[in-house]
Amino acid sequence: MRPLPQYTTCFAILFLAACSFAASAEEKFKVCADPLNPPYSTKNKDGFENKIAELFAKELGQTIEYYWLPQRIGFIRNSLNAPLKDSDVESNEYKCDVIMGVPAGYDLTLTTAPYYQSTYVLLIAKGRGWDDITDAAQLVDLPLQRQESLKIAMFDRGPGTTWMQKNGLLDVGIPYQSMSGDGENNVAMQIEKDLKAKKIDMVILWGPMAGYVAAQSPKNSYSMIPMKSTPDMKFDFAMAMGVRNGDKARKETLNKLIAAKADAIRSIIAGYHIPLLPLPKQAIREDND
């Protein structure tokens, strides 16, 4: 996606804001978000999705309003698709209108064009006898005695666990839940604490969460090795924003902002140590159709 020339960008954003106000009296940018989900979103509004939401609200001349809800089963139903109620009568408004991060093409929402792409990585704590590992495939070929000493986190679902199963490493995995229901730690926070406590030495983790873990320790405390996608196992994914199914006008508004502010968005995300990959042109075209 090619950034628009500066003068065109300014005109497009001003026109977009004017159209938004003319189309409705709405003055709020209503975001559905988890209050304890670093590096994405937090109640302190210091996650990268919070920062991008602030950027978009500013461009539209709107005020951010959050509907906070832990991202568990039923999140979409109870946030994006939940109408506001006044005296038990359903209104035409909803608790929130935008989810700042969903997989491109997610089937529970209408999705925008993708705005970043990342990958799962093998994150290894340095100085614990694994510094010679530079590729995940090396774990498969280790001598049995060394392989049995692995302390690698394994989630109840996800491509990392599928990879471990395929390569005969399930027996050395230390189990974790993808949705723990912990009110004090999200997955990235728990993994970070357990790595420091040496309960685990490594984990196959989604890029944004791996970036968060690495950022909590001095520089070069971890090796971050990208996992390699194959035709039968995908590790890299494009991420978009989600709106209600049928809300095409809001999707178009967000798509224009994603295009106009592409450099600013990428700069925000890069500041969170997240491994970024180029967005495939095919994915951009499909989500703009």
Image: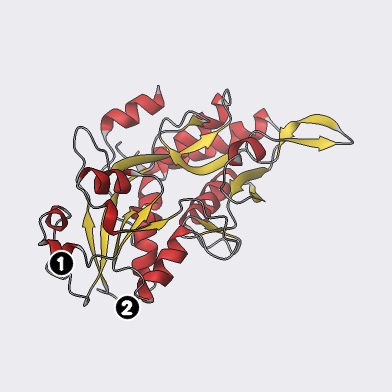
Image quarter (top left, top right, bottom left or bottom right) of the C terminus: top left
Q: Residue at x 53, y 31 (%)?
A: 109
Residue 137 sits above or below residue 254 on the image: below
| Residue 192, above or below 280 | below
Q: Residue furthest right?
A: 87
Tag 2 near tag 1, CB within 8 Å: no
Mark 2–mark 1 Cα distance, whole angstroms, equals 27 Å
In x, y percent, where is residue 254?
Answer: 50, 36
x then y, percent, for residue 4 = 35, 38
Q: Quadrant of residue 73?
A: top right
Q: Residues within 10 Å of mark 2 (few under 14, many from 20)?
A: few
Residue 108 appears left or right of 280: right
> Mark 2 or mark 1: which is in front?
1
* Residue 24 circle label: none
The one nearer the camera, 102 or 199, is 199
Looking at the picture, how far across and down is residue 225, in whole percent?
A: 21, 58
Residue located beneath label 2 in the image? 218
Q: Which residue is mark 1?
A: 146
Q: Is residue 187 left or right of residue 119?
A: right
Name the image quarter holding the N terminus: top left
